Amino acid sequence: MRVFVAVVPPPEVVDHLDAFLEPRRAAGDFRWTRPEHLHVTLAFMADAAPHRVDEYVDRLAESLDGLPPDALALSGAVVFPNVSEGRVLATGVTGAEVLGTASVRARNAAVACGIEVDPSTGSGRRGQRFTPHVTVARTGGRFVEMTSWVRLLETYAGPSWPFGSVEVVASHLGEGPRRSPRYETLAEILLH
């Protein structure tokens, strides 16, 4: 199974970002992320054995227990791998410290369950530091100079929301509209 752990912004946060992007989408030759797919990835496992996922959910809940409360908000711009040769356009997320801790714990829980984790989770490249972000568009593999898009997203600041849960999601490739992935929430873990 393709599985990831995500922080999913509430509908009002997604709607705010979607309203900001809507009039600008025609100007970019991108594959725009559908609003219902907007999330912050904390850990990605490309090939998790289905029988290990329940154990993972339990271990993840234990490992996330006691995370300090924090407010999150979408703001700013992130591009992977870099602005002059971008492939992924994203908005940043405030609350980097708590999200970084949650990401490490989510990855460690997977390893403890015998599930291999993609080392580039949240960084765009293997070996780079975790950068919390929400992907808003992809180039389809082409390199694109994105300075104007970075300037645009740098003006964006969305509403805040409390970091109160994470979701464990299965990604079914090619099963969504226009052969996009279909996401299935396997578990929601409420944080205390």
Image (cartoon, rainbow, N blue to C red):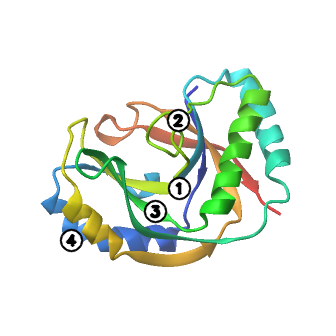
Task: Tell me which residue sits at (85%, 59%) in the image.
Answer: 66
Task: Tell me which residue sits at (67%, 20%) in the image.
Answer: 49
Q: Which of marks 2 and 4 is in front?
A: 2
Binning the other alpha carbons within 10 Å of mark 1 as few (below 14), some (14 to 19) or many (20 upward) gives: many
Give the labeled residue for mark 1: 132
Q: Marks 2 and 4, Cα distance to the nearest angstrom? A: 36 Å
Task: Tell me which residue sits at (53%, 35%) in the image.
Answer: 127
- The disc, 1 or 4, on the residue closer to the chain's N-terminal end is 4
Q: Judge by depth and name the residue closer to the eye, 180 or 143.
A: 143
- The disc, 2 or 3, on the residue closer to the chain's N-terminal end is 3
Give the labeled residue for mark 2: 127
Q: Nearer the viewer, mark 1 or mark 4?
A: 1
Location of residue 93 in the rendering, given as x and y in whole percent from the top left corner: 51, 64
Q: What SS does tag 4 mark?
A: helix
Give the labeled residue for mark 3: 92
Q: Marks 1 and 3, Cα distance to the nearest angstrom? A: 6 Å
Give the labeled residue for mark 4: 23
